[in-house]
């Protein structure tokens, strides 16, 4: 047996460090050089997954997993238990069964636990104009214009169902404000040519991003529109429609994502094959959407950039020597029952076989896997 704590076997120290909460692991590293060498290296510039684990419903912490460093981070987050969660710019938005809404930063919480760093937002139960219980509004996505830690003048936008599609909130407001969507288009011009097994186009808003000082959204007809959240009458205006040569894409596309990469606006189309009770992701197509020239360009390669899409706000990562574990020119995705990597170079998909996730969770209890963009 070691007479000095610094002489404990490295394997034992490594095992101990893996069992600690993140803030305690950092303290572990500060004990001495031997413990620091044994402790698992922490990287705060790699995306995490936030995974819902039924076994942890009675605990006060949530588990975050980094697929690039194979580390599991336990963070004290009793506020997320039993709630549906969404992520944007490193922040988590929680919606409870009572439609109460809160926002917090898991990385800041991991480093210093405080119960006063939660931002309370207005209840979302007034977003729906329907009165029956079936139509209780459900948030589908959460988008931040900026991190609340870096800017007090941020805006929160959500895509919601059933009578949305968009609502937003600014600090100091007592209620959510709904956004008037652009005029609906004739769905038949997209759906008349559908064959059996094709996906139906319904004009729902699928994604929103804060790009070049404004919110930009895309609907399932391929229309790009901007959102005015500063005027007395919040409105949305279509500025660009999908070119005719790409319209056949929507027959096999299940979801669209907007991503900013090096100042460019990218639209990522997720291709799927319908099955009896669900669908299977078969690939992705990436477009560079130039709002100035009104041109769409399909990309065959993204170079040393990779994209992260799913139920979270989408984001890009520039891959270099400091981003070990992240492969360039890829789309990392999460979906109901499907988590994996799409390789742009050879159009190959690798599904993560280690993920055991219920593809049909109750929407009001569980959350799908989320990419958490490291941000303070």
Image (cartoon, rainbow, N blue to C red):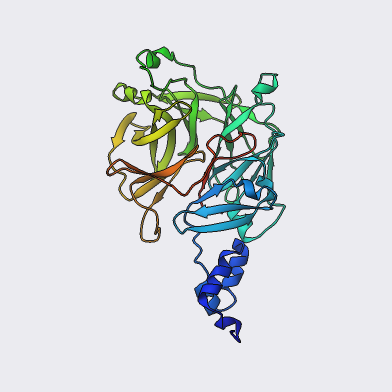
Name the residue at 55% across, 73% down. Answer: 13
From this viewpoint, is residue 308 visible?
no
Using the image, determine if residue 248 lies above or below residue 52: above
Q: Which quadrant: the C terminus?
A: bottom right
Q: Which quadrant: the N terminus?
A: bottom right
Image coords of residue 118 (percent x, y): 68, 48
Name which quarter of the figure residue 247 lies in.
Answer: top left
Question: Which residue is more in the foreground, 221 or 154?
Answer: 221
Name the residue at 32% across, 30% down. Answer: 295
* Direction from residue 275 to residue 55 in the image, left or right: right
Name the residue at 48% across, 23% down. Answer: 237
Using the image, determine if residue 63 lies above or below residue 195: below
Name which quarter of the figure residue 123 lies in.
Answer: top right
Image coords of residue 27 (percent x, y): 61, 70
Image coords of residue 285 (percent x, y): 34, 35
Question: Which residue is more in the foreground, 228 or 140?
Answer: 140
Question: Which residue is more in the foreground, 176 or 206?
Answer: 206
Image coords of residue 347 (percent x, y): 30, 40
Q: How many marks?
A: 0
Q: Residue furthest bottom?
A: 3
* Direction from residue 215 to residue 118 in the image, left or right: right
* Direction from residue 319 to residue 104 in the image, left or right: right
Name the residue at 59% across, 64% down. Answer: 19
From this viewpoint, is residue 192 visible?
yes
Question: Which residue is more in the foreground, 229 or 56?
Answer: 56
């Amino acid at each position: 047996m070691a007479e000095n704590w610094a002489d404990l076997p490295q394997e034992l120290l490594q095992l101990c460090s893996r069992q600690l909460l993140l803030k305690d692991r950092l303290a572990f590293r500060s004990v001495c050089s031997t413990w620091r060498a044994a402790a698992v290296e922490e990287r705060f510039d790699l995306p995490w997954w936030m995974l819902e684990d039924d076994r942890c419903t009675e605990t006060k912490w949530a588990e975050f997993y980094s697929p690039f460093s194979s580390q599991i981070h336990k963070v004290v987050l009793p506020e997320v238990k039993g709630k549906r969660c969404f992520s944007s710019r490193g922040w988590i938005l929680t919606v409870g069964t009572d439609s109460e809404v809160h926002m917090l930063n898991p990385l800041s919480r991991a480093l210093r636990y405080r119960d006063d760093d939660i931002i309370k937002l207005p209840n979302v139960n007034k977003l729906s104009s329907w009165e029956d219980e079936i139509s209780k509004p459900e948030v589908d996505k959460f988008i931040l214009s900026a991190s609340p830690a870096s800017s007090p003048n941020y805006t929160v936008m959500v895509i919601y169902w059933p009578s949305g599609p968009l609502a937003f909130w600014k600090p100091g407001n007592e209620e959510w404000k709904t956004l008037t969507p652009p005029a609906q288009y004739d769905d038949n011009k997209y759906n008349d040519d559908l064959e059996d097994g094709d996906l139906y186009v319904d004009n729902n808003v699928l994604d929103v991003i804060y790009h070049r000082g404004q919110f930009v959204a895309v609907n399932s007809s391929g229309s790009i529109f901007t959102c005015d959240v500063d005027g007395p009458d919040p409105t949305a205006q279509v500025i660009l429609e999908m070119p005719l040569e790409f319209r056949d894409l929507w027959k096999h596309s299940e979801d669209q994502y907007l991503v900013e990469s090096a100042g460019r606006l990218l639209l990522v189309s997720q291709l799927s094959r319908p099955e009896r009770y669900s669908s299977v992701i078969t690939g992705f197509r990436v477009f560079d959407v130039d709002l100035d020239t009104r041109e769409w360009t399909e990309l065959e390669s993204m170079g040393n950039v990779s994209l992260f899409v799913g139920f979270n706000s989408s984001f890009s990562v520039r891959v270099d020597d400091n981003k070990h574990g992240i492969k360039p020119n890829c789309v990392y995705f999460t979906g109901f029952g499907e988590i994996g990597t799409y390789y742009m170079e050879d159009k190959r998909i690798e599904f993560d076989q280690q993920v055991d996730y219920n593809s049909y969770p109750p929407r009001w209890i569980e959350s799908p896997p989320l990419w958490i963009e490291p941000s303070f």
